[in-house]
Image (cartoon, rainbow, N blue to C red):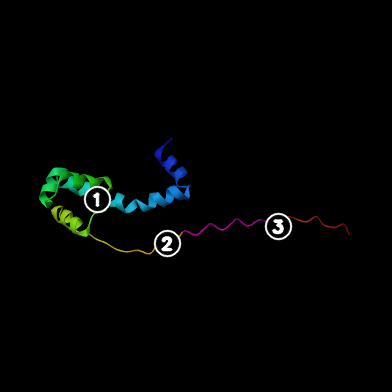
């Protein structure tokens, strides 16, 4: 089974969908950190040294297994010539699809 097919199937499960959507911010942050670090040609250890921390901290950030402080994110961003952007967005609830309208059954005509 292809990943996209499996994902589509799993997303039908409300509990899976909730967890998937809840992990999205960590995934996006991790992805951006990895991309920017690699563009700068830095290893995790080199980035950690630049911001005065240890490599496992960077590893946790890049794996999405951390909830970093804004202070740490600012230090990482500065070392990567980037900036941190934080915003709050309203949650848009998905509307349930309206049920398909049923066609009325044709009534047999009375014989006149």
Viewer-closest of 39 and 45: 45
Please name which of the two marks, 3 or 1, marks the residue nearer to the observer: 1
Tell me the distance, in whole angstroms, between the alpha carbons under discs 2 and 1: 24 Å
Query: What residue is shown at x 78% (from left), y 56% (from top)?
Result: 107
Q: Is residue 4 left or right of residue 31?
A: right
Which comes sooner in the sequence, label 2 or label 1?
Answer: 1
**Crowdedness near tag 2: few (<14), some (14–19) or many (≥20) residues, C-alpha within 10 Å:** few
**Label 2 to label 3, Cα distance in Å?**
34 Å
Q: Please name whichever residue, 60 or 25, is drawn nearer the observer in this view of the structure.
A: 60
Please tell me which residue lies in front, 91 or 110. Answer: 91
Q: Would you say residue 69 sits in the magenta stretch?
A: no
Q: Position of residue 17 (x, y in %)?
A: 43, 50
Q: Is residue 38 left or right of residue 91?
A: left
Q: Which residue is mark 1?
A: 32
Q: State which region is magenta.
A: 94-102
- Seen from the viewer's position, the closer of residues 110 and 96 is 96
State the mark number for residue 3: none
Q: Is residue 96 magenta?
A: yes
Q: Secondary structure at mark 2?
A: loop
* Percent x, y of residue 66: 26, 50
CB atoms of marks 3 and 1 within 8 Å: no
- Tag 1 or tag 3, which sits nearer the N-term? 1
Q: Find residue 104 and report its horizontal and vertical position in percent.
A: 70, 57
Q: Residue at x 39, y 50 (%)?
A: 19
Q: Which mark is residue 104?
A: 3
Q: Residue 33, percent across and down?
A: 22, 49
Q: Which element carries disc 1, helix, strand or loop?
A: helix
* Cα–Cα span, label 3 and label 1: 54 Å
Kindly identify which residue carries mark 2.
92
Assess disc 1: are there few (<14), some (14-19) or many (≥20) residues with their C-alpha within 10 Å of its C-alpha.
Answer: few
For the stretch drawn in magenta, the main secondary structure is loop
């Amino acid at each position: 089974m292809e990943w996209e097919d499996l994902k589509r199937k799993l997303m039908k499960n409300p509990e899976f969908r909730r967890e998937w959507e809840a992990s999205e911010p960590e995934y996006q942050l991790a992805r951006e950190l990895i991309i920017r670090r690699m563009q700068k040609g830095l290893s995790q250890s080199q980035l950690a040294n630049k911001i005065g921390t240890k490599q496992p901290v960077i590893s946790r950030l890049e794996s999405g297994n951390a909830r970093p402080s804004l202070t740490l994110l600012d230090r990482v961003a500065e070392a990567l010539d980037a900036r941190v952007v934080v915003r709050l967005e309203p949650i848009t609830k998905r509307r349930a699809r309206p049920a398909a309208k049923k066609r009325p059954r044709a009534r047999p005509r009375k014989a006149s």
